[in-house]
Amino acid sequence: MRILVTNDDGVQAPGLLALAQEMRKLGDVTVLAPDRNWSASGHVKTMERPLRVRETHLADGSDAYTSDGAPSDCVALAVLGILDEKYDLVVSGINPNANIGHDVTYSGTVTAAMEAVISGIPGIAVSLNSPPEHGERDYGPAARAALRVAEKIVSQPLPEGVLLNVNVPYLYDDEFKGFMVTRQGLRVYRDALVRRQDPRGRPYYWIGGDFPTGIPEDGTDVGALAAGYVSLTPLQLDLTARAALDPLRQIDW
């Protein structure tokens, strides 16, 4: 079993280290992750410039690789053979904050797993629902939950074209209520435009606002996390809104 581990927070992120250490219990692990933070980068494919890959080491001294590309670039580079390896599983994370609801369209963590699935390899994205503005985080429980999920997916593969989005509550292992298969919930964003001027009087902008929340409806990823469950949301690559097909066909185009 060969496992590719990546993330969107950068190769030295503590969540990636915790994930790689647990995945080594399942198989041979290769780490290829971005050399900087790509949070909220979405699904990127870099084609207008060359990509570079170099060797590095994680905090535990283990070998790793890093690229100046996005998380999805890292997966593509590995799958296309830059390291002359074939992979059986791609696991992305551990993101320090949850990726729930509409977050999945922004998340580099999720779209790295998506890139794996596009290439026909099972993909799992793992995120930790830690409180906003949290200091040093304990990724251990989330990493152990990720290992359990990976073991199940290896023995009972996901359907073709489906990735698994895993969100873990910020609890100790023995405090988890269990694992719950969920659908996407409703994320509530409170974005605001922050306008400023540089020293030369020219305007620039930040997209700011309060930390997003969610509506904890039963059966959703938001609801599962609020109740103390590890949320397992299957996501499909086919984004077709099938309910809209027939109404659109009735229009005289």
Image (cartoon, grey):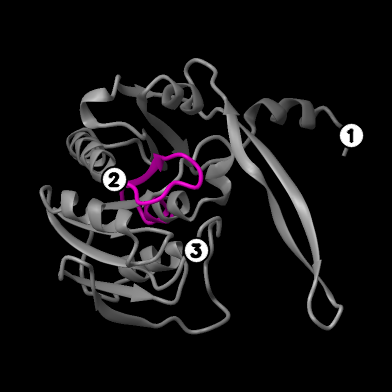
How far apart are labels 2 and 3 at the CA level?
21 Å
Q: Secondary structure at mark 1?
A: loop
* Kind of residue at badge 2: Asp
Q: Indicate the position of residue 170 as horizontal and vertical percent values.
A: 36, 35
Classify residue 226 as left or right of residue 178. right
Q: Which mark is residue 38?
A: 3
What residue is disc 1 on? Answer: 252
Q: Indicate the position of residue 14 as horizontal and vertical percent values.
A: 30, 57
> Badge 1 local density, few (<14 within 10 Å), some, or many (20+)?
few
Reply above or below: 73 against 165: below
Q: Secondary structure at mark 3?
A: loop
> Which residue sits furthest right?
252
Range of magenta residues: 115-139
Closer mark to the observer between disc 1 and disc 2 = 2
> Badge 3 local density, few (<14 within 10 Å), some, or many (20+)?
some
What residue is disc 2 on? Answer: 138
Of the residues under marks 1 and 2, which one precedes in the sequence?
Answer: 2
Q: Secondary structure at mark 2?
A: loop
Classify residue 186 as left or right of residue 180. right
Q: Indicate the position of residue 214 as horizontal and vertical percent values.
A: 58, 29
* Kind of residue at badge 3: Trp
How far apart are labels 1 and 2 at the CA level?
57 Å
> Which residue sits furthest top?
218
Q: Residue at x 20, y 41 (%)?
A: 147
**Considering depth in this image, is 183 or 61 the residue closer to the camera?**
61
Reply above or below: 65 against 120: below
How far apart are labels 1 and 3 at the CA level?
44 Å
Of the residues under marks 2 and 3, which one precedes in the sequence?
Answer: 3
